[in-house]
Image: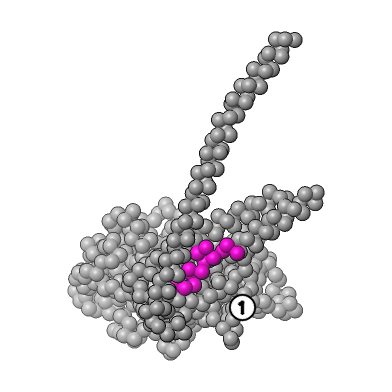
Amino acid sequence: IVFFIYLWSIDPEAVKIAMSCFALFAYEADIRFGFDEAAVLTLLPNYNIYMELSAASTTFVTTGRNALQKKILSLLRRIEYATPGNKQAWYDTFVSQQHLAKFLAIYPKRVDDLGSTGSTASSPSVSASEASGFVGGGYGKFGKRRTGVHSSEHDIEDVFHEWANMTGFLCALGSVWLPVKNRPGTHGIPADTRRTSMEPVSSDLHYCPVTQFIGDSLKYLVCQNEKFGIQIQRHIQDLLGHELNPLCYPILFDQIKIQVDKFFDANGQVICSEQNTQFIDNVIVIMRSVFEMKAQQAVQNALEGPATTTGSTNTLGIVPNNNAGSPSSVVNSSSNDPNSSSTSGSGRNGSQQTNENPLANVNSLEQLVLNIVRYARQLDTSVAAVPIRIRVCQLVESMMKRRDDLSFRQEIKFRNKLVEYLTDWIMGNSHQFNQVHALGQSAAGVGVGSGVNVTTSQLVVDQYQHLARELDQASMEAVATLLHSLPLQPEESDRGDLMEAKSQLFLKYFTLFMNLLNDCGDDLNDDQSSLSDHQQTNNERPTSNITNQTQQQQQQQQQ
């Protein structure tokens, strides 16, 4: 338990020592049951991961703290054998991480002030005993001791980095707490394994603290703390999007859906607010990262080349089922192909790998994506709303690229509905652009003699026009992925004559695409005309300068 907990320490030397100590477990198992592989696997089901952690402690000697944590998290994501030790380490870390998150969310408020001011959605309340526990050193049985509530700026930064390490640890190792039936490694563990922590480990599979952890983490996507708010949001985005154990994806999407559903009233009307919009924007980044991790990991593996000291590389879309293996067998069984489905050997002389697809277990995806699109459709016509719509289109495109890995209940209906929504954004901003343009013209009219910056208003119009064209492109790319091999399906109310309704739908989309092509052609012609005028103006300037110089010389000679 202690070795696991020290993996999220902010002291790199302590982390490396803890990593090296994992090899002691493997050596002890070899000494006791060296000729009985079954007994070794029973005693130490995560044998190969422990050996890789130990090897990484010497490989990453000169690397920075962030790179070391990245390597640790990549190895922890491959642990799928739940043991009393790693479960208890996860639970203890979860309790400490909750305290630190609450402390950072209210910083720099005094703990005593919370009793009178209460708490807000962005600043959860913290009791005096909790604050004194983790700031004064109560949680310091696993981390550095603090010297008091009024910590120095450096200590506060250490608290933040420790929280970030804890959160990454909980994301990567979260699979050990999942209530998965017949999970490998849950059978054959000695019953007399003792725990060194006083925290209880619940045996009730209906209670999953990972669900609470992910749900609480999502709430901090709208943290408004002046000092740490933006950093907390960015870390949650990165850790949930890139470091979360793939087996936790169904929980992640379910928790996102629970939060997004709150943005609609009983009649299905969107409840728009600045905080809701911020949450939508942040979860779009997380979901897109999850969908794109498979391709990103493949590119990273290609750049890194063949592995020499680590085991088979895990892809966040593919979960390897690793049995224990020796260091030598780890090298031989390494694979850089994220789509590889080969298996070789078993036990410590070979690592058996089976491919599973956690995204196939996500059941709430269709309604979640539709609600996100519906929310984006109800945003105002400001310049800030257009980038969110662009990211929504990019999310849909990324989702469709993983179509074979996803499970849809009503795929044809779902994709047709998305096409209907997204095509409204293609050249659908003309009336919105006219509104912005009118505001710019109005500002220009008032600006004469009133001090209004006319140039600024024109820049706003130009910026909006540029973003509108980017939205056209993003919408078209998303619609193209949706329409691929998609039978057009009209709405239920339009099915009087099915063939006629399909023809009208095809004509609508075809006309829209042709109008967009013509509009892009007009823009290209305008750009070429502007370029020609600019070049002509530049060519005329030297001639006029020469003429002026000649006239000046003649006047001087006459004088």
534 vs 280: above or below: above
Q: Which residue is depicted at the point 20% across and 76% down?
A: 36
In the rendered image, residue 161, in percent from the top left (x then y), is placed at: 54, 63
Residue reaching furthest right?
A: 449
Q: Is residue 176 visible?
A: no
Which residue: 54% across, 78% down? 260
| 522 within the magenta span | no
The image quadrant that residue 398 belongs to is bottom left
Residue 427 in sight from this viewpoint: yes
- Percent across and percent down for residue 186 are 33, 83
Q: Nearer the viewer, residue 110 or 314?
A: 314
The residue closer to the viewer here, 79 or 138, is 79
Give the side of residue 143 with respect to residue 499, left or right. Answer: right
Identify residue type, mark 1.
Ile
Residue 248 percent location from the top left of the image:
42, 76
Quarter of the image containing the C terminus? Answer: top right
Image point 45% across, 76% down: which residue? 417
Camera-side residue of 44 and 184: 184
Q: Secondary structure at mark 1?
A: loop
Relative height, residue 428 to residue 552 (above, below):
below
Q: Which residues are magenta?
A: 418-431
Q: Which residue is mark 1?
A: 271
> In the displayed structure, does residue 162 sit left or right of residue 53?
right
Judge left or right: residue 36 versus residue 240.
Answer: left
Q: Mark 1 packing: few (<14 Cα in 10 Å), some, or many (20+)?
A: some
Q: Magenta stretch: residue 430 in it?
A: yes
Q: Position of residue 88 (x, y in %)?
A: 44, 79
From this view, report whether residue 287 is shown above or below residue 57.
below
Tally of marks: 1
Q: Against 101, is 493 above or below?
A: below
Q: Quadrant of the N terminus?
A: bottom left
Quadrant of the image occupied by residue 485: bottom left
